Image: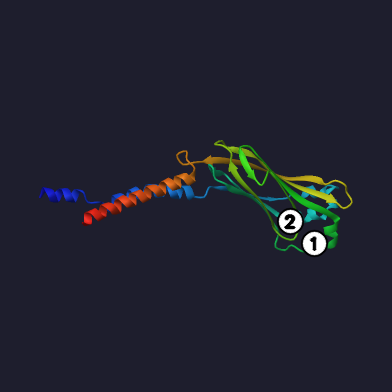
């Protein structure tokens, strides 16, 4: 009778092992959970087109019909990289540019990301010609340099040059505030947390099945 009681006490309770597996699984899901983003939808101030200098560039009129959509992270996992995105969204009823509009001036868009404690790829400044017939994308890859909060601004500037002019003119359009908070799990980067959690799960499963095999003998 005493021997039977001892054998019964050594039997595995599958439910208790399931509880232990939930812990590392929770850490894995937590490390993979997407971080929140801030979205800014901007439209160019049409009063900027009333200036004599801007009236010499018809492409600015077309640019004023575009939506500027900025998506930037509010939190970043330590040691991991994420994207900061500016989409220049063209309206659906956009007509093709005429030859006169194309030849009247040249227009480019410049984005300048001035943020402390932030590693930026390919660099702080991106410049692209304004196509005027479709949507355009400006893409930054960013990661934190340290454990502090990254703060700064993203400047969006139109650079235009009327036909025959010697120098391009700069027209500041927007200044978007940027604030990114670092995130970690127990002070560890998420990739390391995932590896540790997977290793713990494998060890628990190995011990569980080993004991089940011993019970089946």
Using the image as rendered, state which of residue 213 and residue 38 is in the foreground: 213
Disc number placed over residue 193 in the picture, else none: none
Q: Residue furthest left?
A: 1
Q: Which residue is mark 1?
A: 97
* Left-right relation of 198 to 107: left
Q: Nearer the viewer, mark 2 or mark 1?
A: 1
**Callout 2: few (<14), some (14-19), or many (20+) C-alpha neighbours within 10 Å?**
some
What scheme was used to colour the molecule? rainbow
Using the image as rendered, state which of residue 192 and residue 141 is in the foreground: 192
Q: Residue furthest top?
A: 148
Question: Quick check: marks 2 and 1 in contact, CB under 8 Å?
Answer: no
Residue 148: x %, y % from top left:
56, 35
For residue 123, say whether it is visible: yes
Residue 19: x %, y % from top left:
33, 49
Location of residue 95 with respect to 196 vertically, above or below: below
* Left-right relation of 24 to 93: left
Residue in the picture at 85% in, 47% down:
53
Q: Secondary structure at mark 1?
A: loop
Image quarter in which the C terminus is found: bottom left
* Left-right relation of 193 to 180: left
Q: Which residue is mark 2?
A: 65
Q: Secondary structure at mark 2?
A: loop
Residue 36: x %, y % from top left:
54, 47
**Callout 1: few (<14), some (14-19), or many (20+) C-alpha neighbours within 10 Å?**
some
């Amino acid at each position: 009778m005493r021997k039977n009681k001892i054998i019964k006490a050594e039997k595995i309770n599958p439910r208790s092992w399931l509880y232990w597996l939930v812990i590392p699984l929770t850490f894995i899901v937590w490390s993979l959970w997407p971080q929140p983003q801030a979205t800014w939808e901007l439209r160019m101030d049409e009063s900027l087109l009333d200036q004599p200098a801007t009236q010499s560039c018809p492409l600015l009129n077309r640019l004023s019909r575009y939506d500027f959509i900025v998506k930037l992270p509010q939190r970043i996992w330590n040691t991991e990289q994420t994207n900061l995105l500016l989409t220049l969204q063209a309206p659906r009823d956009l007509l093709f540019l005429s030859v006169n509009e194309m030849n009247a001036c040249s227009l480019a868009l410049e984005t300048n990301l001035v943020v402390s404690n932030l590693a930026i790829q390919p660099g702080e400044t991106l410049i692209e010609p304004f196509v005027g017939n479709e949507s355009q994308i400006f893409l930054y890859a960013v990661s934190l340099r340290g454990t502090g909060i990254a703060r700064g601004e993203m400047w969006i500037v139109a650079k235009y040059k009327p036909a025959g002019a010697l120098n391009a003119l700069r027209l500041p359009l927007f200044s978007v505030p940027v604030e990114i908070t670092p995130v970690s799990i127990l002070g560890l980067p998420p990739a390391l947390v995932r590896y540790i959690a997977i290793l713990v799960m494998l060890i628990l499963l190995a011990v569980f099945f080993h004991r089940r095999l011993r019970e089946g003998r």
